[in-house]
Every structure is written in C-alpha cells, then in structure tokens.
Amino acid sequence: MPLTRFRLVIIFDLTCVHGHRFEGWFASSEEFDRQKDAMLVTCPVCDDVGIERVPSAQVRIPKAAGRESAAPEPVDAESAPSHDVVAGMPEEVLSRLREIVRNTENVGRRFPEEARKIHYNEAPARSIRGQASKDEAQELKDEGIDFAQLPPFLSRDTH
C-alpha cells in the first residue's frame, strides 16, 4: 500500500527591492517570516535578500461548503509531483542543469579556499561547487570572484 501523506503549503507572491517578482512556498506565514529574518529567502534572479510579500492576483477558492472535513486532500507519496515539476520548469531544462552540476567537483566547506586558488591561478581552473557562509560569500564577491548560488533543487549532492 503506498504511503499517504498530507501537504499544506501557502504560496506567497514575493518581490525583491529590484522589482523581480516570484513565488515562494511556505508551511505558514510564520515560517516565511522566520526564513526572511534569517535571510534564507532570496531572489532567484539577483540573489537579493530584501524580499517582501506582494498582493496576489490569484484567487484561491475554499473547499465547498458541506464537506465534513477541511483536511487537505491526501497525496500519494510515490505519484506526488516533485518540487521541480511543481516549479513548472521543463524536464529537459532540469535534466541539462543537473548534468552541469554533476560535472562539477564538490569541494564542500573548502569552497571559498578553492575558489580563491582558482581565481588567483594557484590551482587548475575547473568547475566547483560547495558551501560558503554569507560572510565568506560576501568576501568572495568583494575580491571580485564570480560564483552563483545553486537553487535548492540543484544543490542536493548528486554524487
């Protein structure tokens, strides 16, 4: 018997200080506020953390009156769409992006050190990925070292 789970998601329309509009999916309004305060919500276009909620043009109709339960509809865990599919990105684009990420070297927490070595020609040029704190990322930017933050669906370790 397939596992059945319930999913409750609130979709907010968001914008950054540069006017880029996008959607964010959160478990609650409080969770959005927590992530925003922790600077975890970033613009997918410019990586800005100055994010605000904006009024939504969509109308969400509540469940029909007369239902005995307001519980969310069950979702079959095996057939539930992945976050990638829900995001609306074409599968061929996702596949190509994942291939690009697979062809990078995961240097983990050594990312700032390795990025500097490559930038200053102290190590062979190659595509790398890893982790950096916000402070480390800012230092790399200040040094003129180009890098980009991977979106969550690509930052899962693929090796």
Image (spheres, helix red, strand yellow):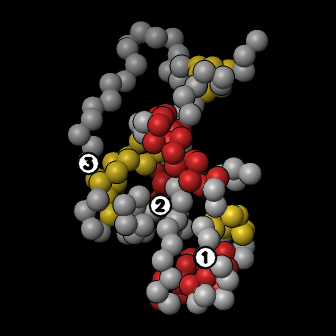
Residue picked out by circle 1: 125
Q: Is the residue marked by circle 2 packed among few (<14), some (14-19), or many (20+) residues within 10 Å? A: many
Determine the CA span between mark 1 and mark 3: 45 Å
Q: Earlier in the sequence, mark 2 or mark 1?
A: 2
Label 3 close to label 2 by CB (< 8 Å):
no
Q: Is residue 118 left or right of residue 13?
A: right
Residue picked out by circle 2: 41
The mark closer to the camera, 2 or 1, is: 1
Q: Please name the amino acid that badge 3 sits on.
A: Pro
In-front residue for pair 60/13: 13
Residue picked out by circle 3: 55
Q: Is residue 101 above or below residue 81?
A: below
Q: Residue at x 64, y 61 (%)?
A: 104
Q: Residue at x 54, y 60 (%)?
A: 150
Q: Earlier in the sequence, mark 3 or mark 2?
A: 2
Residue 96 place in picture, x, y as percent: 51, 45
Q: Quadrant of residue 5?
A: top right
Residue 81 place in picture, x, y as percent: 54, 28
Q: Is residue 73 visible?
A: yes
Q: Please name the amino acid that badge 2 sits on.
A: Val
Query: Among all residues in the image, which is located at the extreme front?
Result: 124
**Secondary structure category for the residue under label 2:** loop
In-front residue for pair 16/93: 93
Q: Quadrant of residue 11?
A: top left
